[in-house]
Amino acid sequence: MSSKESIRDANRWGLLLAAWLLAVAATLAALFIGEVMGKTPCVLCWFQRIFMFPLAVMLTIACYRADFTVWLYALPLTVIGWGFALYHSLVFVGVIPEALKPCSAGTSCSGADMLIFGSVPLPLLSLAVFTAIVLLLAMIRRRALV
């Protein structure tokens, strides 16, 4: 293995590790907010969890195996989760009209329950994490094709 390939693998390893850390942190934070803080997730939060939780497991296995082809199966999952996070963020800030909100029963998708520490909006945090993971996986993909 040449030094150029070693550097490229080290860069990909760093990107993979960063994506894994974000996914695990988001998963643990979602569990903490729901189970310890007692905030019931709304419908859109559940959909985002459906895509984040397996992503944490996938990226754990990819890190263990140094599998840089993880982007093939993790990127579609992340992009779909990103779509739900974007929709939820638009609902939260009021861009989506009231008639199109999926959270008509149960926990509100845009109420005060969607804030932690009084001012940090959960939908925007979720969108930021999904965006970062999409970018990291895209960078792994780009470096894999070079």
Image (spheres, rainbow, N blue to C red):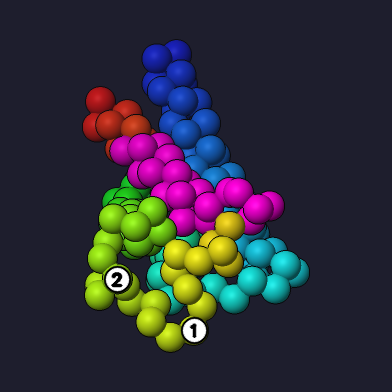
Q: Position of residue 120 (x, y in %)?
A: 58, 49
**Left or right, residue 120 beside residue 141:** right
Q: Which mark is residue 22?
A: none
Residues at marks 1 and 2, CA–CA distance in whole angstroms: 15 Å
Most distant residue in the right direction: 36
Q: Which mark lies nearer to you, 1 or 2?
A: 2
Percent coordinates x, y for residue 2 in the rendering = 41, 16
Residue at image location 41% in from the left, 59% down from the top: 92
Residue 106's disc is: 1
**Residue 54 seen anywhere in this rendered image of the structure:** no
The answer to which of marks 1 and 2 sits earlier in the sequence is: 2
Element class at badge 2 = helix
Residue 44: which quarter of the image? Answer: bottom left
Q: Is residue 95 above or below residue 36?
A: above
Q: Which residue is mark 2?
A: 98
Residue 88 part of the magenta segment: no
Q: Total number of numbered labels?
A: 2
Q: Residue 76 or 71: which is nearer the viewer? A: 76
Residue range highlighted in magenta = 116-138
